Image (tube, helix red, strand yellow):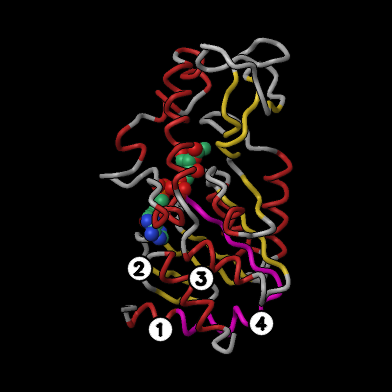
Amino acid sequence: MIHPEVTAVLNELTPILRQAQHVVILTGAGISAESGLPTFRDPMTGLWATYRPEELGTPQAFRQNPRLVWEWFAWRRELVAAAAPNPAHQALVALEHHVPHVTIVTQNVDGLHQRAGSTRVIELHGNLTRFKCFVDNQPITDWKASEDVPPRCPRCGGLVRPDVVWFGERLPEQALNDALTAAKKCDMFLSIGTSGTVEPAASLPYRALDSGAAVVVSNLDVPNRATPPLYYINGRAGVLLPELVQQTWPEA
Ligand code: OAD
């Protein structure tokens, strides 16, 4: 059952979405929660409730204890491999059938948008199924089987690391530029399942607002409120996104 307050905000959004030419969706860990993947900041189940970022998600941590960090990411990779895209990811694929330009900007490293079938996905924080050399950041697709954990770069013998952005590291420049450009050009911007606490992703909705877009922020923390051009909806992405698409194009 959808709360009447949620329905009221959705009703305001459907005409805007129907007219939209370019929609940008910024996603965070919350969109993959219904696929069974933990978020970062949930006080009970979030990854940072169990692990300390500085112990596992920094270059210093990898230098000090590469095996621990490698194994933590290997565990997360297994969770992702066992997970499947959920109705929220699928609703964003459906959006591509109705809106001329759809750009997903994700902070997630799980690749679930691509596995669902979304075609334009900008990965701001990398992807944990890709690897690179800890010495020179060059991509690594394969390495010699050995006892080494982490494995060794086949070119220089340096450590292999996941191709994700750790605390204190710069975001991939092209991805960040593309995300900023999309945020400035879109006419509707949805922020889904992110706490909006990590920069520069957290600023993207403001860039869109400054450029005149309607901005929707949806997660489990916000109230339900419509103060055009800014809208807040509280609820699960796997329920709200399919509902928004269905309500906007009921004939489809
Ligand atoms: P957070 O864990 O900070 O926030 C998750 C958000 O998802 C919260 O606002 C929840 O209310 C919301 N949420 C939870 N379940 C949901 C559901 N079913 N439907 C909709 N919303 C739901 O995760 P992020 O914002 O993604 O960075 O965190 C940002 C970055 O911090 C991550 O990319 C990661 C982390 O450190 C790096 O690893 C570089």
Label 4 neighbour load within 10 Å: few <14, some 14-19, many 20+: few
What mark, if any, has residue 230 been given in the picture? 3
Where residue 193 appears, as percent x and y from the top left, is 45, 57
The question of residue 101 being in magenta is answered with: no
User: Is ligand 1 closer than 8 angstroms to the Cβ of mark 3?
Assistant: no
Of badges 2 and 4, the one in the foreground is: 4
17 above or below 81? below
Tag 4 or tag 2, which sits nearer the N-term?
4
Q: Identify the residue shown where x is 33% and y is 83%.
A: 4
Residue lying farthest front?
145
Would you name the residue on which mark 4 appears?
19
131 to 6, vertically: above or below: above
Question: Residue 246 placed where, x, y %?
Answer: 51, 81
Quarter of the image holding residue 125? Answer: top right
Percent x, y for residue 89? 52, 61
Q: Which residues are magenta?
A: 10-28
Name the image quarter holding residue 104. Answer: bottom right
- The residue to which callout 2 is attached is 223
Three-letter amino acid code at disc 3? Leu
Point out the image quarter for the N terminus.
bottom left
Q: Of label 1 and label 3, which has the lower sequence position?
A: 1
Question: What amino acid is labelled 4 in the image?
Answer: Gln
The three-letter amino acid code for the residue at tag 1 is Ala
Is the residue marked 2 within 8 Å of ligand 1, measured from its CB?
no
Discs 3, 2 touching: Cβ within 8 Å: no
The front one of 99 and 4 is 99
**Number of marks drawn:** 4
> According to the image, label 1 marks what residue?
8
Of 98 and 55, which appears nearest the observer?
A: 98
